Image: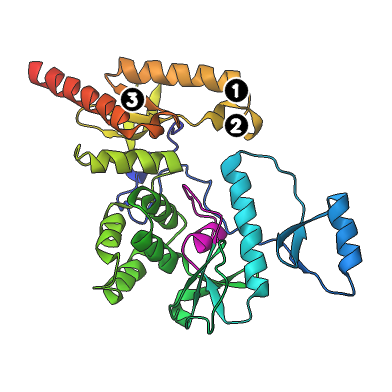
Amino acid sequence: MADDTRGPPAERPRDRRGSRRPGDTALPAPRRLPEVIRSGPWRRSVIERQVRRGDLRPVRRGVYVPSVTEDGGPALRRERRVLALAAAVAAGLKTDVVLSHETAALVHGLNLYGLAEEVHVCQDSKPAGRRTPDPHLRRHPIVVPDRDRTDVSGRPVTTIERTMVDCARWLPGARALVVADSALRAGADPDVVALLLDEASGRPGVRQARRIVEVADARAESVGESLVRWFVLEADLGPVELAVEAPTRRGRYWVDLGWPTLEVGIEFDGLVKYSGGEFGDPRQRLLAEKRRHDALTEAGWTLVHVTWEDLRDPAALIARIRAALAAAYRRRAAR
Protein backbone atom coordinates (compact mmCIF):
# COMPACT_ATOMS: atom_id res chain seq x y z
CA MET A 1 0.00 0.00 0.00
CA ALA A 2 1.45 3.34 -1.01
CA ASP A 3 1.99 6.21 1.40
CA ASP A 4 1.30 9.85 0.67
CA THR A 5 2.90 11.20 -2.46
CA ARG A 6 6.23 12.97 -2.31
CA GLY A 7 6.50 15.11 -5.40
CA PRO A 8 4.55 17.15 -7.96
CA PRO A 9 2.50 15.49 -10.70
CA ALA A 10 5.28 16.03 -13.23
CA GLU A 11 7.46 13.57 -11.30
CA ARG A 12 5.10 10.67 -11.87
CA PRO A 13 6.96 7.93 -13.78
CA ARG A 14 6.02 7.72 -17.45
CA ASP A 15 8.14 4.75 -18.51
CA ARG A 16 6.69 1.85 -16.53
CA ARG A 17 9.60 -0.39 -17.51
CA GLY A 18 12.42 1.70 -16.13
CA SER A 19 10.89 4.20 -13.71
CA ARG A 20 9.89 3.75 -10.09
CA ARG A 21 7.06 5.45 -8.28
CA PRO A 22 7.81 8.64 -6.34
CA GLY A 23 9.26 8.04 -2.90
CA ASP A 24 10.35 4.47 -3.65
CA THR A 25 13.56 4.17 -1.65
CA ALA A 26 13.46 0.52 -0.50
CA LEU A 27 15.28 -0.77 -3.57
CA PRO A 28 16.48 -4.37 -4.02
CA ALA A 29 20.05 -4.86 -2.82
CA PRO A 30 22.39 -7.82 -3.36
CA ARG A 31 22.45 -10.49 -0.64
CA ARG A 32 25.72 -11.54 0.91
CA LEU A 33 26.38 -15.26 0.70
CA PRO A 34 27.39 -16.68 4.09
CA GLU A 35 30.93 -17.85 4.74
CA VAL A 36 31.32 -21.60 4.25
CA ILE A 37 33.55 -23.89 6.30
CA ARG A 38 34.60 -27.21 4.80
CA SER A 39 35.36 -30.19 6.95
CA GLY A 40 38.61 -32.15 6.85
CA PRO A 41 40.35 -34.80 8.97
CA TRP A 42 42.50 -32.25 10.75
CA ARG A 43 39.60 -30.04 11.83
CA ARG A 44 36.68 -32.47 12.15
CA SER A 45 36.67 -32.50 15.96
CA VAL A 46 36.73 -28.69 16.12
CA ILE A 47 33.78 -28.43 13.73
CA GLU A 48 31.82 -31.08 15.63
CA ARG A 49 32.24 -29.08 18.86
CA GLN A 50 31.05 -25.90 17.12
CA VAL A 51 28.02 -27.74 15.75
CA ARG A 52 27.14 -29.05 19.22
CA ARG A 53 27.46 -25.50 20.64
CA GLY A 54 25.20 -24.20 17.89
CA ASP A 55 27.87 -21.98 16.33
CA LEU A 56 27.84 -23.90 13.02
CA ARG A 57 25.21 -25.84 11.14
CA PRO A 58 25.64 -28.37 8.34
CA VAL A 59 24.38 -27.39 4.90
CA ARG A 60 25.75 -30.09 2.61
CA ARG A 61 27.98 -33.06 3.23
CA GLY A 62 31.18 -31.73 4.72
CA VAL A 63 30.13 -28.09 4.36
CA TYR A 64 29.00 -25.83 7.21
CA VAL A 65 27.91 -22.23 7.69
CA PRO A 66 27.73 -20.03 10.80
CA SER A 67 24.41 -20.27 12.61
CA VAL A 68 22.13 -17.24 12.51
CA THR A 69 19.11 -16.16 14.50
CA GLU A 70 16.01 -17.72 12.94
CA ASP A 71 13.89 -14.58 13.13
CA GLY A 72 11.44 -13.44 10.47
CA GLY A 73 8.68 -15.32 8.72
CA PRO A 74 8.83 -18.66 6.85
CA ALA A 75 9.72 -17.02 3.52
CA LEU A 76 12.69 -15.14 5.02
CA ARG A 77 13.96 -18.27 6.77
CA ARG A 78 13.68 -20.24 3.51
CA GLU A 79 15.66 -17.55 1.68
CA ARG A 80 18.45 -17.82 4.26
CA ARG A 81 18.57 -21.59 3.82
CA VAL A 82 18.80 -21.25 0.04
CA LEU A 83 21.56 -18.64 0.35
CA ALA A 84 23.48 -21.06 2.56
CA LEU A 85 22.93 -23.85 0.03
CA ALA A 86 24.10 -21.56 -2.79
CA ALA A 87 27.28 -20.70 -0.91
CA ALA A 88 27.94 -24.37 -0.20
CA VAL A 89 27.33 -25.41 -3.82
CA ALA A 90 29.51 -22.62 -5.21
CA ALA A 91 32.33 -23.59 -2.85
CA GLY A 92 32.01 -27.32 -3.43
CA LEU A 93 31.61 -27.79 -7.18
CA LYS A 94 34.85 -28.24 -9.08
CA THR A 95 33.46 -27.32 -12.50
CA ASP A 96 32.97 -23.73 -13.69
CA VAL A 97 29.41 -22.83 -12.71
CA VAL A 98 27.35 -19.65 -12.58
CA LEU A 99 24.51 -19.19 -10.08
CA SER A 100 21.38 -18.65 -12.16
CA HIS A 101 17.58 -18.50 -12.37
CA GLU A 102 15.83 -18.12 -8.97
CA THR A 103 19.11 -18.53 -7.11
CA ALA A 104 20.60 -15.58 -8.98
CA ALA A 105 17.43 -13.57 -8.34
CA LEU A 106 17.79 -14.29 -4.62
CA VAL A 107 21.47 -13.30 -4.59
CA HIS A 108 20.64 -10.05 -6.41
CA GLY A 109 18.05 -9.30 -3.71
CA LEU A 110 15.05 -9.47 -6.05
CA ASN A 111 11.56 -10.32 -4.87
CA LEU A 112 10.58 -13.98 -5.09
CA TYR A 113 7.42 -15.98 -4.51
CA GLY A 114 7.23 -19.72 -3.90
CA LEU A 115 11.01 -20.13 -3.68
CA ALA A 116 12.08 -23.79 -3.69
CA GLU A 117 14.95 -25.02 -1.52
CA GLU A 118 17.26 -25.76 -4.43
CA VAL A 119 20.20 -24.09 -6.12
CA HIS A 120 20.26 -23.36 -9.86
CA VAL A 121 23.58 -23.26 -11.68
CA CYS A 122 24.54 -22.96 -15.34
CA GLN A 123 27.59 -24.88 -16.56
CA ASP A 124 29.17 -25.36 -19.96
CA SER A 125 28.33 -29.06 -20.27
CA LYS A 126 26.52 -31.90 -18.57
CA PRO A 127 28.56 -33.56 -15.81
CA ALA A 128 30.31 -36.72 -16.99
CA GLY A 129 29.44 -40.14 -15.62
CA ARG A 130 26.55 -41.32 -13.49
CA ARG A 131 25.69 -39.19 -10.50
CA THR A 132 23.37 -39.67 -7.58
CA PRO A 133 20.50 -37.19 -8.03
CA ASP A 134 20.93 -34.15 -5.82
CA PRO A 135 17.52 -32.88 -4.65
CA HIS A 136 18.96 -29.46 -3.84
CA LEU A 137 20.86 -28.82 -7.07
CA ARG A 138 19.50 -27.96 -10.54
CA ARG A 139 22.14 -28.00 -13.26
CA HIS A 140 21.44 -26.18 -16.54
CA PRO A 141 23.87 -27.19 -19.34
CA ILE A 142 23.96 -23.68 -20.77
CA VAL A 143 26.95 -21.59 -21.76
CA VAL A 144 26.73 -18.17 -20.10
CA PRO A 145 28.86 -15.60 -21.96
CA ASP A 146 30.98 -13.14 -20.01
CA ARG A 147 28.53 -10.39 -20.98
CA ASP A 148 25.80 -12.13 -18.93
CA ARG A 149 27.97 -12.79 -15.87
CA THR A 150 28.63 -10.66 -12.85
CA ASP A 151 30.08 -11.14 -9.37
CA VAL A 152 28.25 -11.02 -6.04
CA SER A 153 29.96 -11.94 -2.77
CA GLY A 154 32.88 -13.26 -4.78
CA ARG A 155 30.71 -15.76 -6.67
CA PRO A 156 29.79 -15.76 -10.39
CA VAL A 157 26.11 -14.94 -10.90
CA THR A 158 24.06 -14.20 -14.00
CA THR A 159 23.40 -10.48 -14.48
CA ILE A 160 20.08 -9.01 -13.42
CA GLU A 161 18.92 -8.82 -17.06
CA ARG A 162 19.87 -12.44 -17.79
CA THR A 163 18.30 -13.54 -14.51
CA MET A 164 15.09 -11.72 -15.38
CA VAL A 165 14.88 -13.45 -18.77
CA ASP A 166 15.75 -16.90 -17.39
CA CYS A 167 13.08 -16.63 -14.70
CA ALA A 168 10.53 -15.26 -17.20
CA ARG A 169 11.16 -18.30 -19.42
CA TRP A 170 11.05 -21.03 -16.80
CA LEU A 171 8.92 -19.93 -13.84
CA PRO A 172 5.11 -20.01 -13.77
CA GLY A 173 3.59 -16.68 -14.81
CA ALA A 174 2.80 -15.22 -11.40
CA ARG A 175 6.22 -16.07 -9.96
CA ALA A 176 7.95 -14.84 -13.12
CA LEU A 177 6.22 -11.46 -12.94
CA VAL A 178 7.28 -11.02 -9.30
CA VAL A 179 10.93 -11.40 -10.36
CA ALA A 180 10.55 -9.26 -13.50
CA ASP A 181 8.91 -6.35 -11.66
CA SER A 182 11.63 -6.42 -9.03
CA ALA A 183 14.41 -6.68 -11.63
CA LEU A 184 13.21 -3.53 -13.38
CA ARG A 185 12.94 -1.81 -10.03
CA ALA A 186 16.53 -2.83 -9.29
CA GLY A 187 17.69 -1.17 -12.49
CA ALA A 188 17.58 -3.89 -15.17
CA ASP A 189 18.12 -2.34 -18.60
CA PRO A 190 15.02 -2.95 -20.79
CA ASP A 191 17.12 -2.72 -23.95
CA VAL A 192 19.46 -5.46 -22.76
CA VAL A 193 16.46 -7.60 -21.79
CA ALA A 194 14.99 -7.13 -25.29
CA LEU A 195 18.31 -8.16 -26.84
CA LEU A 196 18.47 -11.33 -24.74
CA LEU A 197 14.91 -12.25 -25.76
CA ASP A 198 15.76 -11.72 -29.43
CA GLU A 199 18.82 -13.96 -29.09
CA ALA A 200 16.70 -16.68 -27.45
CA SER A 201 13.99 -16.53 -30.12
CA GLY A 202 12.51 -19.94 -30.86
CA ARG A 203 13.74 -21.53 -27.65
CA PRO A 204 11.49 -22.99 -24.91
CA GLY A 205 9.70 -20.44 -22.74
CA VAL A 206 10.51 -17.39 -24.85
CA ARG A 207 6.89 -16.74 -25.83
CA GLN A 208 5.88 -16.58 -22.15
CA ALA A 209 8.95 -14.51 -21.35
CA ARG A 210 7.98 -11.90 -23.93
CA ARG A 211 4.57 -11.55 -22.32
CA ILE A 212 6.07 -11.28 -18.82
CA VAL A 213 8.53 -8.61 -19.95
CA GLU A 214 5.79 -6.71 -21.78
CA VAL A 215 3.69 -6.31 -18.61
CA ALA A 216 6.54 -6.00 -16.10
CA ASP A 217 6.52 -2.68 -14.27
CA ALA A 218 9.21 -1.06 -12.14
CA ARG A 219 6.58 0.70 -10.02
CA ALA A 220 5.48 -2.52 -8.30
CA GLU A 221 6.87 -2.26 -4.78
CA SER A 222 5.96 -5.66 -3.35
CA VAL A 223 5.35 -9.30 -4.12
CA GLY A 224 1.66 -8.81 -3.29
CA GLU A 225 1.23 -6.01 -5.85
CA SER A 226 2.82 -8.14 -8.57
CA LEU A 227 0.63 -11.15 -7.78
CA VAL A 228 -2.58 -9.12 -7.72
CA ARG A 229 -1.70 -7.55 -11.06
CA TRP A 230 -1.02 -10.97 -12.59
CA PHE A 231 -4.44 -12.24 -11.49
CA VAL A 232 -6.08 -9.13 -12.93
CA LEU A 233 -4.26 -9.55 -16.24
CA GLU A 234 -5.15 -13.25 -16.42
CA ALA A 235 -8.80 -12.38 -15.79
CA ASP A 236 -8.70 -9.91 -18.71
CA LEU A 237 -10.10 -7.04 -16.66
CA GLY A 238 -8.41 -4.45 -18.81
CA PRO A 239 -5.14 -2.54 -18.36
CA VAL A 240 -4.54 -1.71 -14.72
CA GLU A 241 -2.27 1.16 -13.70
CA LEU A 242 0.23 1.16 -10.86
CA ALA A 243 0.90 4.04 -8.49
CA VAL A 244 -2.30 5.85 -9.43
CA GLU A 245 -2.43 9.47 -8.30
CA ALA A 246 -5.58 10.31 -6.32
CA PRO A 247 -6.20 13.93 -5.19
CA THR A 248 -8.31 14.23 -2.01
CA ARG A 249 -9.22 16.91 0.51
CA ARG A 250 -6.25 15.73 2.62
CA GLY A 251 -3.83 15.99 -0.28
CA ARG A 252 -2.63 13.58 -2.92
CA TYR A 253 -2.24 9.87 -2.32
CA TRP A 254 -0.92 7.01 -4.43
CA VAL A 255 -3.19 4.00 -4.85
CA ASP A 256 -1.29 0.74 -5.39
CA LEU A 257 -3.16 -0.34 -8.52
CA GLY A 258 -6.31 0.83 -10.18
CA TRP A 259 -8.40 2.23 -12.99
CA PRO A 260 -8.20 6.03 -12.55
CA THR A 261 -11.03 6.88 -14.98
CA LEU A 262 -13.36 4.63 -12.98
CA GLU A 263 -11.90 5.62 -9.59
CA VAL A 264 -11.51 1.98 -8.60
CA GLY A 265 -8.34 1.07 -6.72
CA ILE A 266 -6.70 -2.04 -5.32
CA GLU A 267 -4.69 -1.78 -2.13
CA PHE A 268 -2.43 -4.59 -0.98
CA ASP A 269 -2.37 -4.65 2.82
CA GLY A 270 0.78 -6.37 4.09
CA LEU A 271 0.66 -7.06 7.82
CA VAL A 272 4.28 -6.02 8.33
CA LYS A 273 3.61 -2.29 8.27
CA TYR A 274 1.12 -2.65 11.12
CA SER A 275 3.50 -4.69 13.29
CA GLY A 276 5.73 -1.87 14.53
CA GLY A 277 9.50 -1.96 14.07
CA GLU A 278 10.79 0.27 11.29
CA PHE A 279 7.25 1.30 10.39
CA GLY A 280 6.67 2.99 13.77
CA ASP A 281 3.77 2.75 16.19
CA PRO A 282 1.19 0.38 14.64
CA ARG A 283 -1.66 2.32 16.26
CA GLN A 284 -0.55 5.50 14.54
CA ARG A 285 -0.19 3.61 11.26
CA LEU A 286 -3.75 2.30 11.56
CA LEU A 287 -5.10 5.75 12.39
CA ALA A 288 -3.26 7.29 9.44
CA GLU A 289 -4.57 4.55 7.16
CA LYS A 290 -8.16 5.17 8.33
CA ARG A 291 -7.83 8.88 7.54
CA ARG A 292 -6.35 8.02 4.16
CA HIS A 293 -9.12 5.55 3.37
CA ASP A 294 -11.82 8.03 4.41
CA ALA A 295 -10.29 10.76 2.25
CA LEU A 296 -10.13 8.48 -0.79
CA THR A 297 -13.68 7.20 -0.45
CA GLU A 298 -14.99 10.74 0.09
CA ALA A 299 -13.21 11.67 -3.14
CA GLY A 300 -15.25 9.01 -4.93
CA TRP A 301 -12.83 6.10 -4.94
CA THR A 302 -13.90 2.49 -4.44
CA LEU A 303 -11.08 0.55 -2.82
CA VAL A 304 -10.65 -3.22 -2.85
CA HIS A 305 -8.35 -4.19 -0.01
CA VAL A 306 -6.31 -7.36 -0.55
CA THR A 307 -4.40 -9.43 2.02
CA TRP A 308 -2.13 -12.45 1.72
CA GLU A 309 -5.07 -14.65 2.65
CA ASP A 310 -7.06 -13.27 -0.30
CA LEU A 311 -4.27 -14.30 -2.67
CA ARG A 312 -4.87 -17.95 -1.79
CA ASP A 313 -8.22 -17.77 -3.62
CA PRO A 314 -7.67 -15.80 -6.84
CA ALA A 315 -11.16 -16.60 -8.18
CA ALA A 316 -12.87 -15.03 -5.16
CA LEU A 317 -10.54 -12.02 -5.34
CA ILE A 318 -11.25 -11.45 -9.04
CA ALA A 319 -14.99 -11.70 -8.34
CA ARG A 320 -14.67 -8.85 -5.81
CA ILE A 321 -12.67 -6.71 -8.23
CA ARG A 322 -15.07 -7.45 -11.09
CA ALA A 323 -18.02 -6.41 -8.90
CA ALA A 324 -16.31 -3.13 -7.99
CA LEU A 325 -15.63 -2.38 -11.67
CA ALA A 326 -19.21 -3.23 -12.66
CA ALA A 327 -20.57 -0.87 -10.01
CA ALA A 328 -18.23 1.87 -11.24
CA TYR A 329 -19.44 1.44 -14.82
CA ARG A 330 -23.06 1.70 -13.63
CA ARG A 331 -22.30 4.89 -11.69
CA ARG A 332 -20.63 6.42 -14.73
CA ALA A 333 -23.56 5.47 -16.97
CA ALA A 334 -26.02 7.06 -14.55
CA ARG A 335 -24.27 10.44 -14.54
- Residue 288, horizontal then vertical, whole percent: 50, 20
Q: Is residue 105 magenta?
A: yes
Q: Residue at x 35, y 38 (%)?
A: 228
Looking at the rendered structure, the secondary structure element under dot 1 is: helix
Q: Are marks 3 and 2 in contact (CB under 8 Å)?
A: no
Considering only order in the chain, which callout, 3 or 1, is on the residue closer to the N terminus?
Answer: 1
Q: Quadrant of residue 184?
A: bottom left
Q: Report the residue marked by disc 2.
A: 279
Considering only order in the chain, which callout, 2 or 3, is on the residue closer to the N terminus?
Answer: 2
Q: Main secondary structure of the magenta part?
A: loop
Q: Report the residue marked by disc 1.
A: 282
- Amino acid found under the numbered disc labelled 2: Phe
Taking the image as shown, residue 43 lies to the left or right of residue 18, namely: right
- Residue 156, horizontal then vertical, whole percent: 57, 74
Say if 155 sits above or below 325 in the image.
below
Looking at the rendered structure, the secondary structure element under dot 3 is: strand
Query: Range of the magenta residues?
Result: 100-118
Q: Residue at x 35, y 67 (%)?
A: 193
| Quarter placement of the C terminus | top left
Count of numbered tags:
3
Which of 87 and 129 lies nearest the eye of the viewer?
A: 129
- Residue 244, horizontal then vertical, whole percent: 32, 36
Q: Is residue 109 magenta?
A: yes
Say if 163 sits above or below 263 in the image.
below
Q: Report the residue marked by disc 3.
A: 304
Taking the image as shown, residue 277 lies to the left or right of residue 118, namely: right
- Amino acid found under the numbered disc labelled 1: Pro
Looking at the rendered structure, the secondary structure element under dot 2 is: helix
